[in-house]
Amino acid sequence: MDTDEKYMSIALHEAQLAYAEGEIPVGCVIVAGGQIIGRGHNLTQMLHDVTAHAEMQAITAATETLGGKYLQGCTLYVTVEPCIMCAGAIGWAQVSRIVYGASDPKRGYTTFAPQALHPKCTVTAGVLADDCQQLIQQFFAERRNG
């Protein structure tokens, strides 16, 4: 297992925690220097807050860990392509690299705001995409059928 798959697996674990809590199963971890400095999963239902996405939770945790608002030199791993709001926050935080699993053609930033990230940010898409997509699809299938 390569490094990206390792950290995406941890992000998937975060997504599974969200799933268990009845939240849309998206998970995120932020890594600096081989250490996880922030993690989070969707908490929009629990917190009654539409901004409580996995990335926002992880960014807040990472900036608290580092004691500053910028995340240069950090890699953000998230199970689903960030939305416009999260891409904007990732851009403002100056995250150096994003790795995401499943694409989100309905709400993903690449469709609606491809310039939202910091200009120096690099993106790797599709890491463990099948696992990430399966979890999301299972969640929504249960909601439709349950």
Image: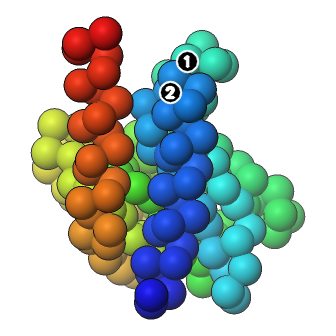
The image quarter in which residue 24 lies: top left
Q: Amino acid at mark 2?
A: Glu
Q: Determine whether the residue tagged by mark 2 lies in a helix, strand or loop.
A: loop
Left or right of 73 on screen, residue 142? left
Please state the horizontal and vertical placement of residue 20, each as a whole percent of the image: 56, 31
Q: Determine whether the residue tagged by mark 1 lies in a helix, strand or loop.
A: helix
Please state the horizontal and vertical placement of residue 30, each as a whole percent of the image: 61, 67
Left or right of 59 on screen, residue 85? left
Pick the quarter of the image with the N terminus: bottom left
Residue hosting label 1: 45
Q: Is residue 28 visible?
A: no
Residue shown at 45% from the left, 44% from the top: 26
Residue hosting label 2: 23
60 over 20 or under it: above or below: below
Q: Are marks 2 and 1 in contact (CB under 8 Å)?
A: yes
Q: Amino acid at mark 1?
A: Gln
Residue shown at 56% from the left, 54% from the top: 13
Question: Which residue occupies the foreground of this view, 36 or 69?
Answer: 36
Residue shown at 83% from the left, 63% from the top: 65
Please state the horizontal and vertical placement of residue 120, each as a whole percent of the image: 40, 81
20 over 76 or under it: above or below: above
